[in-house]
Image (tube, coloured by chain):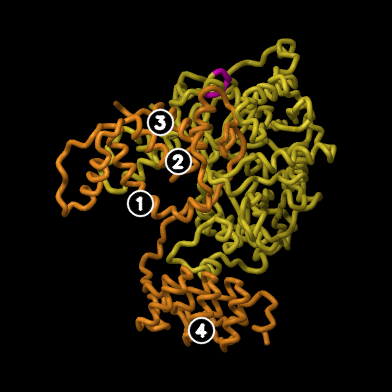
Chain colours: A yellow, B orange
Amino acid sequence: MATGDNNSSSSGETPDPNPNSNSALISDPDDSSASIEALARRVQETLTLGVNKQHKFWETQPVGQFKDLDNPNLPEGPIEPPTPLSEVKAEPYNLPAPYEWVTCDMDLDSTCTEVYNLLTNNYVEDDENMFRFNYSKEFLQWALRPPGYYKAWHIGVRVKSTKKLVAFITGVPARLRVRDQVVKMAEINFLCVHKKLRSKRLAPVMIKEVTRRVHLENIWQAAYTAGVVLPTPITTCRYWHRSLNPKKLIDVGFSRLGARMTMSRTIRLYKLPETTVTPGFRKMELRDVPAVTRLLRGYLGQFAVAPDFDEDDVEHWLLPIENVVDSYLVESPETHEVTDFCSFYTLPSSILNNQNYSMLKAAYSYYNVTTKTPLLQLMNDALIVAKQTDYDVFNALDVMQNEEFLKELKFGPGDGQLHYYLYNYRIRNALNPSELGLVLL
Amino acid sequence: MTMTGRGLRARSSTSCSVRPRPSLRRRRRTGARRRFRSQLELYGLYKIATEGPCTKAQPSILNVSARAKWNAWHRLGAMPPEEAMEKYIAIISEIYPSWEDASTSKKKNVDASDSGNAAKGPMGPVFSSFVHEEDSDSDLKLDAIHVCAREGEAEKLVRHIENGIPVNSRDSEGRTPLHWAVDRGHYNVVELLLKKNADVNAKDNEGQTALHYAVLCEREAIAELLVKYNADTNLKDEEGNSPNDLCSSSWTFILS
């Protein structure tokens, strides 16, 4: 019997949005007339999520296991100690015969284009296959080449005979702080297998291969996210969306216009001022890196899990790059002190099968810090600049202090849940999203 | 025989592989009707799958919901539970297409972390869009003529007018059918209403005319049509804005 997603309830930390989900198939639907539909919904949920599912791959990996949830006898920290480098497998894992490993050099425009094409045609879609992420080439070059990155961690799989790139996975190095420990980790992302090869079981061997290459650099921990429940999330976040261009969002099916709501009222509801309101609000520049680093370090210290950014990291991750990442700050007109900071990254999605539009331009809230300006006002200014630069929607997770502004600034809840994971690092209790200070791209 | 998660899954993979998926558009269009019928069907199939044929007494005709459910169950007679499960899954797959992906990801999770056909990969980011919330503005009272205008049902609308329904009927927000047709962008219905002498400058409870709506919703062709029918570009709404003030596009027919 498959059961529902009750990991969050058993962890006792995050509220379970649907505590009855695990009774989906045993409850008698006679209870109410709506129960048939509820049953159908539950069947769906039951099969989508679940802690009692077998995870043959993940059960072999050093990750928090569901059976260990809330076991007070297990220490926080690495699950397995590092092995001597000489014992790390020196050769790549075996791929099925028609395929070969390739290291993707993201400096090369031609390689970058290949990766871009693979992802644009095969990467993450929504449940209804109406949208697919369309990470730009510039974005990929930014995301994959932070300070100290390893080319060997940009791993592709080609068809031997045609050299066609058919799968991809990446890691980038990062220092993450978990409570009071700063740990060198790999952030694993962009796992993508060509749609026609989804039955070939490439993903597990790709995860093992990137893990091997991470180990070769004497790094033993990793962070990653997933839309599915695996053993075991450190926290589960929800996406929220703020319409900037409601008419287009409705036209393309990103949001729906209720039968009793008018388009004109909806448009008025989401109207934003033409200009930002905070005095001294401006784009971040290179000279701001030290001040922004100080602000960020001071702010991120309060979260249980957060990146440990130095100036090089801040210069890479937060200095604006057109259509990739935008950062704004508040410089006090009197003291010229930098007091507040907000940022978002640009992740468009292809709109599949719409006659009028082919691309959805979305801003994703990244890191925001306030010391003087009210958070609500700062984020409203972020919405205003995003609207001015033609974004259709502004997305944010309920991480950090984001909950304080989401509802007030007319964000609505999304259908996407994002689970965060650590590899080979145990934390005893799941976190609330507001205890997480990490945004993965 | 009990209906287990495993049983459901096993059925799903067979039924999914042989049955072509209907196109998204078709699924959408027929969604509401389909869903209602499916609920009862699902109920009957569920009961067959879990309890077998219906042997209970038929509920009273006054108990509409219980009777409909009983009928749905009874109708299936002695259908074998396996067949019921298969049909149940087929319906679920149609109503909740993403369920199929979920079941694929399920398979994936059982033996390893393959990408499966799941829209959500085994690892990585998630595409999220708005949760569809039920209308909260439930105090709104609409007449059938407003609904026709909203849905762009020109022929029905004509029939209402011919049956003596006033062309300028107001809903509880003071909107006329013309407001609704403009709001939803039904050019033909707008034109039809204007030809039937709809009041082009009728204001809703917030003082907005159909031209305000057309400007806000950036419906240029409709705005031009309204102006041609003498819509006033300078009528102010309660907030003091005229269509002219609200117009951010360079529509010369409004600015003149």
Residue A309 against residue A91 in the figure, above or below: below
Residue A1 against residue A439 in the figure, above or below: above
Distance from Cα at disc 2 to Cα at disc 1: 15 Å
Marked residue nearer the N-terminal end (2 or 1): 1
Q: Secondary structure at mark 2?
A: helix
Residue A318 against residue B234 in the figure, above or below: above
Distance from Cα at disc 4 to Cα at disc 3: 56 Å
Callout 3: chain: B
At x 29% / y 34%, what residue is drawn? B79
Q: For residue A378, what is the image quadrant?
A: bottom right
Give the amino acid at mark 3.
Answer: Leu
Q: For residue B165, what is the image quadrant?
A: bottom left
User: B182 or B125: nearer the eye?
Assistant: B182
Give the amino acid at mark 2.
Answer: Ser
Q: Secondary structure at mark 4?
A: helix
Q: Which residue is mark 3?
A: B8
User: A369 or A352: nearer the eye?
Assistant: A352
Callout 1: chain: B
User: A121 or A244: nearer the eye?
Assistant: A121
At x 52% / y 40%, what residue is drawn? B20
Callout 4: chain: B
User: B92 or A51: nearer the eye?
Assistant: B92
Distance from Cα at disc 3 to Cα at disc 1: 22 Å
Magenta span has A83? no
- Neighbor class of circle 4 (other Cα within 10 Å; few <14, some 14-19, many 20+) is some
